[in-house]
Image (tube, rainbow, N blue to C red):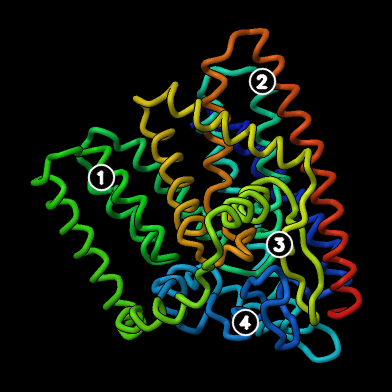
Amino acid sequence: MMSKILKYKNEMFLFILVVITYLIITKIFFSKTTIFYDLNNTYDVLLDTDTGVLFNLNVFAISQDNSKHILFSAIISIFAYPIYLFCTSIANPGTTDFNSAYGFGLICLQIITSAMSITLVFNHIKKIKMQRLTLILLTMIMIFSFPQLFMTLNVERFIYSQFSLIFFIVIANKMKGKNSYLVELAAIPLFGITISNIYLYFFNMIFEFKLKIGKMLKHLITFILMAYICVVSTKSYESFMNLGNVIQYDTKFISGEPILEKIAMIIERLLYSVFYFPGASIKKGLFLQNGEVATIPVILTLLALCFCVLSVIENSEKRVPKLCMGIIIFNLTLHGIVGYNLVNSSIMAINFSFAVIILLAYFTKALRKNEKNMYNIFLSLLLVTIVISNVNGFIEILNIGIKSYPV
């Protein structure tokens, strides 16, 4: 028993370290502002996220979420409802404010979820033959990247969506070639937390069964039955039936810019935010993207993505790199080519930033010794610029919070 525990000592140490790091950052903000959870009924303040909306509706514990997140409330309330009850019991006017207690509780739940995602990624990439320094740098880049930090501290759905993607990849990779229905079970959170993420289940099914239509249908029917049982048992069918109306409403968020302008926006507003704090400014009290970015981070980001493409080419026989590239391509298509929420697409980077980290890890397999040293220099430069960018960005958020949403 002890030997099994010691086998994962590095993962346990990393998990604790990430939790402590994020708690320290949370404490800095929490003592001065409510900007990450309660915005006094003002919405779309932080980079077009639903911060404040979800908190006021309390979709984490007692309310049904919309059709794009059909099982979100049912899944997350398993953990958030006890937090809600505890905060209700300790709330006392004059001593303990309910909103502050509940906001802190939800952020703690997100910190744990984020730490689990980072730990799962670390557990996978450490199995790839690479220098220890490379492993540390890649892990640090994920910890301090903009999407990971922002979506961990900001009370929203995104960090749970990211975990469902990573968890599915882990299960799909372990069950590869075993014809297991655990993959269908792992796909339920994909479907339930953010319905569009179900694409990853279909990608994996194609990679697993190729043109074996019979097996594909067998697993697909099983998944549909599982999803049906979950929707009915959680009484989420009304939300599901309204999905068409929600999709029709969301078409107004599709950008219609010319293709060359779209390419520039993809780089400046979506890809840049995989690592760096997006260019943003305050307009009418809202902190929104403006597309202004620094040149060196853009170059480093594009280099990293080139390495991701080479990584897939070099590891085309492996399941995880193919799934990761599928994730990147899907998000580039949805938010870039189609243009869904492209104007404020920095918040969508959380759904594929981890895939970039994994592919950067696989890229090391094709490098010679002297090339690995150069690669570590690149990763070090990437990490330093990420920290500088995000420190400046989060200080800006802190200042906005102190001014407009003080404790």
Question: What is the distance, in whole Å, between disc 2 and disc 3 at their CAs?
Answer: 29 Å
**Is label 3 in contact with label 1 (beta carbons under 8 Å)?**
no
Q: Which residue is disc 4 drawn over? A: 53
Q: Within 10 angstroms of label 1, few (less than 14), some, or many (20 or more) residues?
A: many
Q: Which mark is residue 132?
A: 2
Instruction: Please tell me whether mark 1 sits on a helix, a strand or a loop.
Output: helix
Decide: is 141 above or below 290: above
Q: Residue at x 36, y 36 (%)?
A: 173
Dot 2 or dot 1, earlier in sequence: 2
**Count of numbered circles on the image:** 4
Instruction: Please tell me whether mark 4 sits on a helix, a strand or a loop.
Output: helix
Instruction: Please tell me whether mark 3 sits on a helix, a strand or a loop.
Output: helix
> Which amino acid does the dot numbered 2 rest on?
Arg
Q: Nearer the viewer, residue 33 or 385?
A: 385
Residue 110: percent from the left, percent from the top? 62, 61
| Residue 244 appears anywhere in the view | yes
